Amino acid sequence: VMQVYFERIFDQNGVLRGTVFVHRDMTREYEVDQMKSEFVSTVSHELRTPLSSVLGFTELMLHKELKPERQRKYLETIHKEAERLTQLINDFLDIQRMEAGRQSYDFAKVDLVPLAKELIETMAFHAPQHRLELDAVTDPAPVRGDEAKLRQVLLNLIGNAMKYSPNGGEVRVMIREAGDELAVSVTDQGLGIPKESLGHLFTKFYRVDNSDRRKIGGTGLGLAICKEIVKAHDGRIEVESQLGEGSVFTLYFPRNQAVRGNEVRLSDGN
Ligand code: ADP
């Protein structure tokens, strides 16, 4: 995006001597502007949806005589929407902190097997329509990581796997060695992702747009956050998918790294 100014130069007799052109490359400013307006429109849309239902239901409760069971139902909705708002705001703050390099990490030796096991048990309890399986080909599976942050990544991937398989099916978490890396994959049998979207998934606010999914809520921030966290662990995240068949998200972490502080070498399997 170029911005062009020009100014004609006259001498003291009023004779045109020339024209000065100033070309300014505004690409960066334009991009920042675009991002800002995208941010504002996404944020305001995403915040407005839960807020308007909180407002609607509280108004109903204030102005109408309601049976206790109806009251309870409305309160549950209000609670759920308030939780969604909190999640949204946390996600916004997280991604901003990470992108600014202001996120601190507390690295230690983390075994991914019990972590995945615990998450799967918790998630299975809340989602009886999905079959959640853990396949720990490598056990134990120690990495140098921040446990809370790794939990956040896995929760996000397992949560997406369930969210984007509205008809249920199996969600399989597999932990295995892949060369000199540890790979954790989350496989679902859900909606899948169109080819042209695969390259954009980890961009913040990106959401695959089609009628099936429009009903499924989200901010488009989860995978961008995952990517930042995995990057901070010297790892990477990849996706494979077949539309209508399902998706596989795989995290790769380096193995054989010394954990600073307690001097444990992961390669010893200690
Ligand atoms: P959100 O789920 O809040 O929209 P994410 O960043 O977690 O944001 O994901 C971005 C987009 O990638 C989603 O909107 C969805 O379209 C697509 N996606 C993510 N995970 C899956 C999955 N397991 N199956 C199908 N589509 C997915």
Image (cartoon, helix red, strand yellow):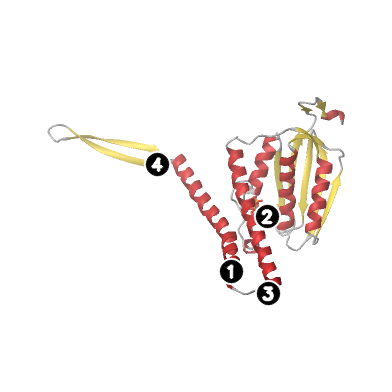
Q: Nearer the viewer, mark 3 or mark 2?
A: 3
Structural distance between the alpha carbons of marks 3 and 2: 44 Å
Q: Secondary structure at mark 3?
A: loop
According to the picture, the residue beneath numbered tag 3 turns out to be: 67
According to the picture, the residue beneath numbered tag 1 turns out to be: 62
Q: Secondary structure at mark 4?
A: strand
Q: Are marks 3 and 1 in contact (CB under 8 Å)?
A: no
Q: Is mark 2 within 8 Å of ligand 1?
A: yes
Query: Taking 215 as reference, is 178 left or right?
Result: right
Residues packed near mark 4 inside 10 Å, few (<14), some (14 to 19) or many (20 plus): few
Residue 135 sits above or below residue 11 on the image:
below
Residue 33 sits above or below residue 76 on the image:
above
* Residue in the image at 57% along x and 56% along y: 46
Q: Is mark 4 within 8 Å of ligand 1?
A: no
> Which is nearer the eye, 45 or 214?
45
According to the picture, the residue beneath numbered tag 2 turns out to be: 193
Structural distance between the alpha carbons of marks 3 and 4: 63 Å
